[in-house]
Amino acid sequence: MRILNSTQMRKVEERAFKSGISYYQMIKEAGEKCTEAIVGIIEPGKVEDESFLILCGNGNNAGDGFVIAQKLRYLGADVKVLLLKGQPKSKDAMRHFENMQMSKTPVIELNKDPKAINPLFESSTVIVDCIFGIGFNPKLKISAEIANIFKAVNKYVGTVFSVDLPSGLASDEGSTERLAIKADYTFALSNYKPAHILKPAALFCGQVIKLDLGFSPFISKDGQEIFALNEDYIKSLFKPISPMAHKGDFGRLYSVCGSYKMPGAAVFAAKAAVLSGTGLVTAVFPKTAYSAIASGLDEPTFLPLEASADGTFNSEGFPKLLDAASNANALLVGCGIGNNSETSAFVEQCLQKIKCPMVIDADALNCLASKISLLRGSKAVITPHLGEMSKLCAMTVEEIKKNKIQIARDFAKEYGLTLVLKGANTLVAHSDGRVAINTTGNPGLATGGSGDVLAGLIASFLAQGMKTEEAAQAGVFIHGLAADKAVENYSMRGLTPSRLLEFIPKTLSTFESLELFQV
């Protein structure tokens, strides 16, 4: 599901214009498609029973509103237009304003008649928000008068439609630090925008309905693609299972996780790998954690290594891992291993000497934060949360939140790896500049151990032969979907990693099929 940011969308419109489609025509098409959608939601034949209030700014988004007002007026609806910033400045929007005036639609200007606001809201049953579009600049301060309109809309009990984006949201962000309109329905013109998908902004959009404006021929692949993960796409990543398969066909994974103080991380990661289909899983852990980790695992084989004084990995145990992992299809390192000079040296050796595809998580990332150059060209999958990402890129968490997509993209490209930036709407950034936004999951995943399960899933799919970016995409989507299924049976507060693990096989059942042979 392709997503376009504001810059990409403007380029699409520019290409359409150069092909001979005027901006006047684009506005007309957008307004007509929005009207059709509104009528379809309200139900044909009932539109004339509604009283519409169209809120318009002074740009092309207002032009969409003028077309909607004119079309609804012709259908017999009671329609009024409220101009929040005076008459339109755009010449194309102005032409549509003049067309609308021919339908004798009542027009009220906020600065000329502020006392009319309350009666307008009270007499309306439907509001259509056409104040700001994707061109909204979040750095500009919204006037007190418009802020009051936003507040009035958010207290409104009728239906609220927003055209392209609820006004007050920035197209390319998931942030809602500023005041914004909360819509029941949002019409995504031509393509989804990041704010339609990224939380918490997406929660302001209500139900998002994409309207095709015929721009597909003008959308190019520029190496900066953003797309949302969906079930059909994830299904395409799983190859059919051969009826003649044996355990060697599903990969060998070495899960290098856990320590004396954090044995659970090793258990969750290894169990996730087993439950998601890895043929052979070897749990690698410090000897001192043997009893705690071994008691929680039945299916994997074990490779206990020499431990440091505080029960973590040390360099003395690495040669044994290096020898054993010579036949590995994938390696997972980091969950619960601790962060000290000895684990740092151990992780460095893993990166430098083990050649199979690798997932680097949690403490392994903390170990590498001061030696980040070791990641360059590793082609690994790294899975930081925002705090870990802050250390890796020397930025504050707040700075990352404000520009997550671009920061994730830049990091993945610079270091030549796949970056899984965890959080609400986990991002998967590829080394070629593409970024996938995950659409599954819920706040129940915000608990210790959830990340270990995710790391085990990604490593499992990597061991089974998926490419790094595919394994990351499949891992985050199925991790979130399993959590969504789990909370239907338990609750978000009750979603522990152990409960989450129960739902992995059930979730995966819809993504697999048997290979068919010709007879």
Image: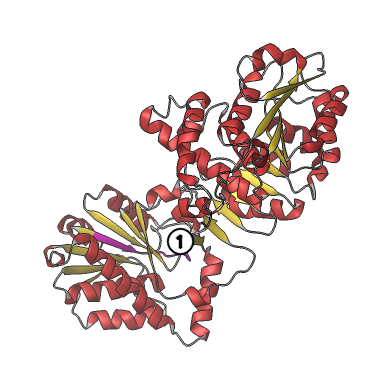
Closer-to-camera residue (463/247): 247
Q: Which residue is mark 1?
A: 192
Closer-to-camera residue (519/147): 519
Q: Amino acid at mark 1?
A: Tyr
Where residue 461 appears, x then y in whole percent?
Answer: 62, 42
Above or below for 474 versus 166: above
Closer-to-camera residue (290/113): 290
**511 sits left or right of 341 in the view:** left
Quarter where residue 338 is shown: top right
Q: How many marks?
A: 1
Quarter where residue 492 is shown: top left
Q: What residue range appears in magenta?
A: 127-138
Above or below for 308 versus 437: above
Q: Is any atom of residue 219 visible in this view? A: yes
**430 sits left or right of 13 in the view:** right
Q: Residue at 46%, 50% (x, y): give it.
A: 231
**461 sits left or right of 59 in the view:** right
Is label 1 in a helix, a strand or a loop? loop
**382 sits left or right of 347 in the view:** left
